[in-house]
Image (cartoon, grey):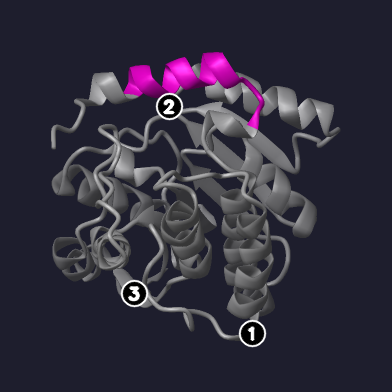
Amino acid sequence: MKTMDLEEIRAHWQNWAVQYGTDLRATTKTSTLKAIEVDAFARAFCPIIEEKGEALKILEIGCGNGQNCLSLSRIFPAASFMGIDFISEMVAAAIKLKVSNQISDDRVVFREGNVLDLDLPKASFDIIFTDRCLINLNSDSLQQQAIKILSGKLKEDGYLLMIENSQSTYGEQNAARESVGLPPRAPAEFNHFFNETTLLPFLPSVGLKLLDIEDFISLHDLVLYVLVPMLNGGQVDYEHPIVEAATKLNIALSSARPSSLGGYGQNRLYRCRKSVNK
């Protein structure tokens, strides 16, 4: 399948930013997905805060219209957040949301920037996180370049947390669909999912140790992309009530037993730590 070039990908997100503004739909098709993503990040942040203290400097690359930073800033009020996106209209919407939520500049800042040309000091953040951002770089090599840059912005013993789509688990999800007579789905043209066979061995070369990979959304995605289509003439329905119920159960089970539901989700949480030797 053809993947868009970088300018086409930029145009896609600019169009969505203009169309949806401050609405969640600017970056995310369903509120259930966003609830599970925020929960996954919050759970990943908690042990880091226990280790390093509450006053962390946290950077999100590809912040869109600010939904993650604003939600997480309410959960972790002592941390400071910076969100960067390469679409000016996304940044404008994020600032608008921040103002409407009465969140001060010392808590959350949004600015325009490009992960491949990141104008930030070296070794300045305790946590850097991405959420379906690096999959918008259309090759393995560009994704590796971005991760190298992000590693350089982490403090020693800092953490890189990436929620990104995986070719591996997407394949497992499609296998589940095909097992019940549904056709496989294809990624959007503006996405290049993580190829773990090339990405994971690359991480140590840029000073990152992979701590773990959490499959945090498998139940939700099996219900949304397999079970609901089985009941609905093959169609995905983001508003189906069983998806809402699956979301609550997914969050509860992930909190008690992370990754216990198998690797069927489109997204995985890759948790990495910066080596003190780099």
Amino acid, disc 3: Leu
- What is the x, y in percent for residue 199? 20, 61
Up the image or down, 244 lies above or below 201; here it is above
Q: Start and end of the magenta stretch?
A: 10-23
Within 10 Å of the Cα at label 1, are there few (<14), some (14-19), or many (20+) other Cα atoms?
few
Asked if the magenta segment contains residue 52, the reply would be no
Amino acid, disc 1: Ala
Say whether residue 34 is left or right of residue 140: right
Asked if the magenta segment contains residue 18, the reply would be yes
Mark pair 2, 3: CA separation: 27 Å
Amino acid, disc 2: Phe
Q: Which residue is mark 2?
A: 86
Q: Secondary structure at mark 2?
A: loop
Tag of residue 273:
none
Q: Which residue is mark 1?
A: 256
- What is the x, y in percent for residue 271? 43, 69
Q: Secondary structure at mark 3?
A: strand
Q: Which residue is mark 3?
A: 210
Say whether residue 138 is left or right of residue 272: left
